[in-house]
Image (cartoon, rainbow, N blue to C red):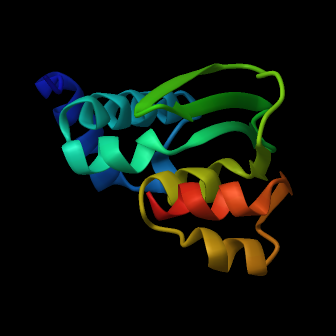
């Protein structure tokens, strides 16, 4: 079951916007995604065929996070991860903007606001989710 308190907390964060977000909010968004993925059959199906490991670097806050999508599940954490499928780097505002749905990843990539190193095909597949 999706944690109602987390939903309420994240609604306040989303309403405040990406510019007000802190790096730790990324982990809360990942937790919300994880809980939703455990209950939503459509999302679970999307994740079933994935085997993606993402390293995220917030360049202006010296923060790092990772996210794994594998066999219908999501895992995440702080710090570095071994053998990422791709590494995504952006400022806090751009990264949070993507997580909060305020920034289109493709547009940000084309504008040079984010960098992606590694498998671009995996990055595009994950973006669709």
Image quarter of the N terminus: top left
Q: Is residue 1 visible?
A: yes
Residue 28 position by quadrant:
top left
The mark tally for this picture is: 0
Residue 34 position by quadrant:
top left
Between residues 104 and 96, which one lies in front from this camera angle? 104
Between residues 126 and 14, which one lies in front from this camera angle? 126
Q: Classify residue 73 as left or right of residue 82.
A: left
Residue 31 rendering spot, x and y as whole percentages: 38, 27
Q: Residue at x 47, y 31 (%)?
A: 71
Residue 40 rendering spot, x and y as whole percentages: 20, 41
Residue sitting farthest toward the front? 49
Residue 99 rendering spot, x and y as whole percentages: 48, 52
Q: Residue at x 76, y 68 (%)?
A: 113
Q: Residue at x 49, y 28 (%)?
A: 27
Residue sitting farthest toward the right? 117
């Amino acid at each position: 079951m999706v944690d109602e308190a987390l939903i309420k907390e994240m609604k306040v964060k989303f309403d405040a916007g990406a510019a007000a977000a802190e790096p730790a909010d990324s982990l809360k968004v990942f937790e919300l995604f994880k809980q939703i993925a455990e209950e939503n059959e459509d999302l679970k199906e999307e994740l079933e065929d994935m085997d993606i490991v993402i390293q995220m670097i917030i360049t202006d806050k010296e923060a790092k996070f990772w996210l794994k999508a594998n066999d219908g599940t999501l895992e995440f954490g702080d710090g570095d991860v071994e053998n990422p499928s791709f590494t995504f780097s952006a400022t806090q505002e751009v990264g949070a903007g993507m997580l909060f749905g305020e920034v289109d990843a493709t547009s940000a990539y084309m504008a040079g606001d984010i960098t992606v190193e590694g498998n671009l095909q995996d990055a595009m597949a994950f973006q669709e989710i």
